[in-house]
């Protein structure tokens, strides 16, 4: 079969001929229908310090994908051949204190598809059956491909109440954009965002943001104070930029919450942490997706039919065009890039 892999410890990825993975007990074999490119894949492609220290080539990359089960391993009785499934990228141990108390999303032994084990940018992939999440066929293939990333947004948004609330989202990358439409679907009163990229500002408008502020052009603190006097009920931090965390602390109302998903490049310079204390703000770290609550909530959102995800899918291309996909992403000229796997 063909696969996109990191072959050598250096920048770039390439298409290789790889043997089809063999079924194993407790696992399922999936024939790929679509996959999508994540920021993590870009880190691996550019071979930054994180990926250089973590990845052991040769490694087939890709952790956001969907397809049909073509074979089930010994002992698998709740997945069957023909099931349409989406990937959950975190393989958890099921044995640590977190796993045993329903907090598998922060399992200390987590292995990630396409990072620590071979992933799904390939014609076939074999993964643990629990990581193959049954998905209704009414969910389009190009959306089912990125439920792992959509789940990050669902987890962040649903970290607290949304209906009737005023929400600030700092950063309009794909997960921020997903969060806008999720907030709207759940009945948020107002959704406001900050973003500097004109390309992403345009996408934010297409998914239905109420207002999007560009710090390069607008006095953001002043505009936020006018838009939400007294502050926002919740801020979803999706930029990983220290200035936006400071903004979040300032513009979240007393007693509100800040849910943090954006990963910071380095340790954040001191923010006014006493403001968090005296405003009684809930500062919440968001990792992965709750297993499996987030997946159930996501299925419910799909059924509700109110998610407006299409504008975020800016490119659909054949997986053999991966080079172009990586370049578009690196240039910041893409939302979600989806790969198809037709022969
Ligand atoms: Zn991802
Ligand atoms: Zn565990």
Image (cartoon, helix red, strand yellow):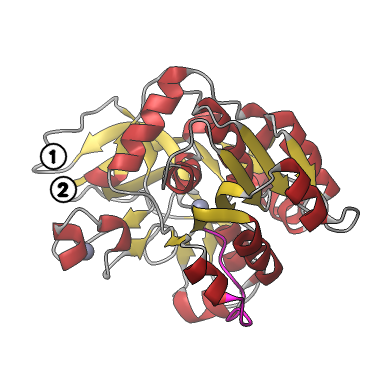
Q: Considering only vertical position in the picture, is 50 above or below 284? A: below
State the image coordinates of residue 66 (x, y, percent, origin top left): 43, 36
**Secondary structure at numbered mark 2:** loop
Dot 2 or dot 1, earlier in sequence: 2
Q: Considering only vertical position in the picture, is 63 above or below 339? A: below
**Residue that carries the numbered disc 1 in the rendered image:** 76
Q: Residue at x 52, y 60 (%)?
A: 5
Q: Say whether residue 30 is left or right of residue 286.
A: left
State the image coordinates of residue 182 (x, y, percent, origin top left): 53, 33
Dominant SS in magenta: loop
Q: Say whether residue 174 is left or right of residue 104.
A: right
Residue 20 in view in this figure? yes
CA gap, disc 2 and disc 1: 5 Å
State the image coordinates of residue 290 (x, y, percent, origin top left): 32, 49
Tell me if residue 262 is in the magenta stretch.
Answer: yes
Front-most of 25 and 249? 249
Residue 217 - label: none
Front-most of 55 and 93? 93
State the image coordinates of residue 121 (x, y, percent, origin top left): 50, 49
Quadrant location of the C terminus in the rendered image: top right
CA neighbours of label 1 inside 10 A, class few (<14), some (14 to 19), many (20+)? some
Residue 26 - label: 2
Q: Residue at x 61, y 37 (%)?
A: 180
Front-most of 79 and 235? 235
Quarter of the image where one finds residue 87: top left
Q: Say whether residue 193 is left or right of residue 222.
A: left
Say if mark 2 contacts mark 1, CB within 8 Å: yes
Residue 317 in view in this figure? no
**Secondary structure at numbered mark 1:** loop
Q: Which residue in the rendered view is the most extreme toward the left? A: 75
Residue range of the region highlighted in magenta in the rendering: 261-272
């Amino acid at each position: 079969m063909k696969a996109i892999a990191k072959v050598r410890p250096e920048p770039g990825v390439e298409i290789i001929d790889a043997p089809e993975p063999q079924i194993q007990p407790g696992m399922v074999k999936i024939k790929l229908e679509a996959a999508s490119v994540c920021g993590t894949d870009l880190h691996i492609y550019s071979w930054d310090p994180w990926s250089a220290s973590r990845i052991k080539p040769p490694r087939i990359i890709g952790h956001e994908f969907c397809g049909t089960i073509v074979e089930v391993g010994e002992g698998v009785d709740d997945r069957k051949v023909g099931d349409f499934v989406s990937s959950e990228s975190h393989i958890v141990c099921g044995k640590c204190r977190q796993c045993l108390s329903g907090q598998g999303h922060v399992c200390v032994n987590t292995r990630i598809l396409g990072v620590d084990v071979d992933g799904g940018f390939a014609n076939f992939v074999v993964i643990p059956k629990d990581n193959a999440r049954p998905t209704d066929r009414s969910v389009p293939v190009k959306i089912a491909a990125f439920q792992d990333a959509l789940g990050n947004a669902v987890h962040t948004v649903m970290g607290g109440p949304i209906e009737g609330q005023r929400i600030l989202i700092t950063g309009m990358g794909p997960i921020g954009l997903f969060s806008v439409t999720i907030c709207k679907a759940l009945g948020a009163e107002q959704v406001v965002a900050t973003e500097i990229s004109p390309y992403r500002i345009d996408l934010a408008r297409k998914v239905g943001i109420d207002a999007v502020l560009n710090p390069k052009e607008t006095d953001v603190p002043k505009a936020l104070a006018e838009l939400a006097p007294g502050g926002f009920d919740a801020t979803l931090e999706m930029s990983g930029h220290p200035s936006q965390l400071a903004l979040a602390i300032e513009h979240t109302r007393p007693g509100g919450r800040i849910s943090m998903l954006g990963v910071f490049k380095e340790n954040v310079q001191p923010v006014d942490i006493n403001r968090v204390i005296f405003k009684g703000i809930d500062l919440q770290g968001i990792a992965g997706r709750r297993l499996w609550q987030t997946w159930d909530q996501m299925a419910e959102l799909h059924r509700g039919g109110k998610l407006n995800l299409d504008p975020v899918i800016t490119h659909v291309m054949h997986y053999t065009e991966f080079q172009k996909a990586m370049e578009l992403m690196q240039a910041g000229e893409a939302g979600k890039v989806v790969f198809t796997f037709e022969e």
